[in-house]
Amino acid sequence: MNDTDRKKRLEESLNKAMGLDRIFKTSEFQIYLLPYLKELSYVSPIDPSKFTSDSEFHYALRTANARAHVFSELIRFLSSQEGMISKIREEILKPKKQYGIE
């Protein structure tokens, strides 16, 4: 990949990260959506007596854990965009690597 293509891809990534960071920092997201996502990222206790078999209980437990993990990852992803922006900007400023023998 040549330097122009590399910078173009990095700028596209930078724009995406900046957009996601703007969304994450909006007051509406912080006040309304983030608390809801945090609530969804916790696994509520599951009563094993409500299931007719251990396999049904384990399936419900695995499903609840997977669901909570997805919401937790989404929060982590959105909150990490500010750091990602810094890394992408540093990468854009780096000179092109030369692999040829001069």
Image (tube, rainbow, N blue to C red):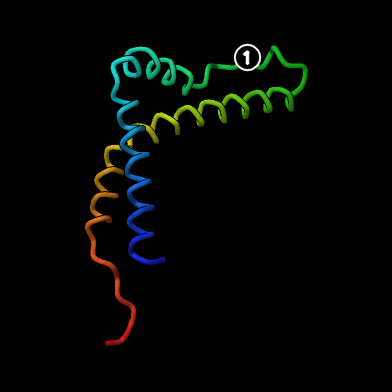
Q: Is residue 20 above or below residue 91?
A: above
Disc 1, SS: loop
Which residue appears at 58% of the width and 24% of the height?
64
How far across and down, in percent of the image, does residue 15 sit? 33, 40
Q: Within the image, what quadrant is residue 102 found in?
A: bottom left
Q: Which image quarter holds the N terminus?
A: bottom left
On screen, 89 above or below 18?
below
Q: Is residue 52 left or right of residue 81?
A: right
Q: Amino acid at mark 1?
A: Asp
Q: Residue furthest front?
A: 4
Point 27% across, 42% down: residue: 83
In the figure, is residue 64 to the left or right of 71? right
Left or right of 8: which side holds 51?
A: right
Q: Which residue is mark 1?
A: 47
Residue 96 in the image, given as x and y percentages of width and height: 28, 67
x, y percent for residue 93: 22, 57
Q: Nearer the viewer, residue 88 or 52?
A: 88
* 66 vs 21, nearest the viewer: 21
Q: Residues within 10 Å of mark 1 (few under 14, many from 20)?
A: few
Residue appearing at x 57%, y 30% in the figure: 66
Picture quadrant where residue 48 is located: top right
Instruction: Using the image, determine if residue 1 lies above or below residue 35.
Output: below
